[in-house]
Amino acid sequence: MAVVPRARRHLSCWLLLHRFVERRNEEGEAYTECRHCGKYTVTQERGNTMLPPPL
């Protein structure tokens, strides 16, 4: 997806309220990308999400 020029961004993106969706590249690595403007961030792989033991 091409990045939208700054002047044509969605209002929510101007307010830094991006609508991120999770995607994968050709190598299978996860990243999140805004549906409106194309801004992306690298997603950290989720490891074991065990909760700490109760007190």
Image: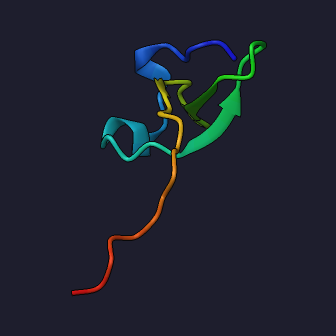
Q: Residue furthest bottom?
A: 55
Number of labelled discs?
0
Figure quadrant of the N terminus: top right
Q: Residue furthest left?
A: 55
Q: Is residue 28 above or below residue 36?
A: above
Instruction: Give residue 38's quadrant in the image.
Output: top right
52 lies left or right of 50: left
By what rule are the colours in the image chosen? rainbow
Instruction: Give residue 53's quadrant in the image.
Output: bottom left
Which residue lies at the image location 65% right of the left edge and 23% below the top edge? 29
Q: Nearer the viewer, residue 27 or 50?
A: 50
Q: Where's residue 46, x and y in %?
A: 52, 44
Q: Is residue 49 above or below residue 29?
A: below
Q: Nearer the viewer, residue 33 or 24?
A: 24
Q: Is residue 13 above or below residue 24?
A: below
Q: Nearer the viewer, residue 50 or 3?
A: 50
Q: Where's residue 7, x and y in %?
A: 41, 19
Q: Where's residue 55, x and y in %?
A: 21, 87
Q: Residue furthest right?
A: 26
Which residue lies at the image location 41% right of the left edge and 17% below the top edge? 6
Q: Is residue 49 above or below residue 27?
A: below
Which residue lies at the image location 48% right of the left edge and 25% below the top edge? 42
Q: Where's residue 16, x and y in %?
A: 32, 40
Which residue lies at the image location 65% right of the left edge and 12% below the top edge? 2
